[in-house]
Image (cartoon, rainbow, N blue to C red):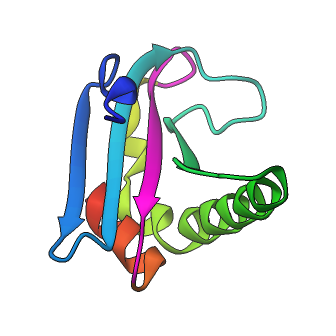
Amino acid sequence: DGVGPLVLSNGSARIMLPGGGTHILCSVKADLVHPAPGIVPSEGVVELHVDHAVSPSSSSRHKRRQADMELQSLLRKLWLPHAVDRQGLCIVPHQYAWRLNIDLLIFSCQGNIVDICAMVMR
């Protein structure tokens, strides 16, 4: 069913467009962390992971993984800076901040995958 990622999530969303050609699941988990060295001490952390749910063969699995990494990079550059206030995730500078783990599980997508992923993460 693909709901495994939801067991430990603090929030989730799913997009299923009519016709069955698009089905994407987003799971968000929040953890309280100490800011790591090298990270701005007055900001929280947002981690984004993208994964296609189905890969029938090892050669297509490699291509899917490469596509996942490219989509992940695009969303980090285009969507995350405008969608998440990292300073708002800081609780006590240098001591405590929230780390958001956003997991996108793509079952199928017929359309603009960047836009649809951005919609499900809203």
Magenta span: 93-110
Rendered position, 58 above or below 89: below
Q: Residue at x 76, y 61 (%)?
A: 60
Quarter that holds the N terminus? top left
Residue 76 x, y percent position in the rendering: 58, 62
Number of marks in picture: 0
Magenta segment, principal secondary structure? strand
**Among the 4 quarters of the image, the one containing residue 30:** top left
Residue, far bottom: 111
Q: Is residue 99 a member of the stretch shown in magenta?
A: yes
Residue, far front: 56
Rendered position, 84 above or below 32: below
| Residue 79 in the figure: left or right of residue 51 | left
Residue 28 x, y percent position in the rendering: 35, 36
| Residue 28 in the figure: left or right of residue 16 | right
**Among the 4 quarters of the image, the one containing residue 118:** bottom left
**Among the 4 quarters of the image, the one containing residue 67:** bottom right
Rendered position, 100 above or below 84: above
Pick whichever, 81 or 61, lies toward us. Answer: 61
Q: Residue at x 51, y 47 (%)?
A: 53
Pick whichever, 92 or 62, lies toward us. Answer: 62
Q: Residue at x 82, y 56 (%)?
A: 62
Rendered position, 6 above or below 21: above
Quarter that holds the C terminus? bottom left
Residue 82 x, y percent position in the rendering: 40, 68
Pick whichever, 108 or 118, lies toward us. Answer: 108
Q: Is residue 104 a member of the stretch shown in magenta?
A: yes
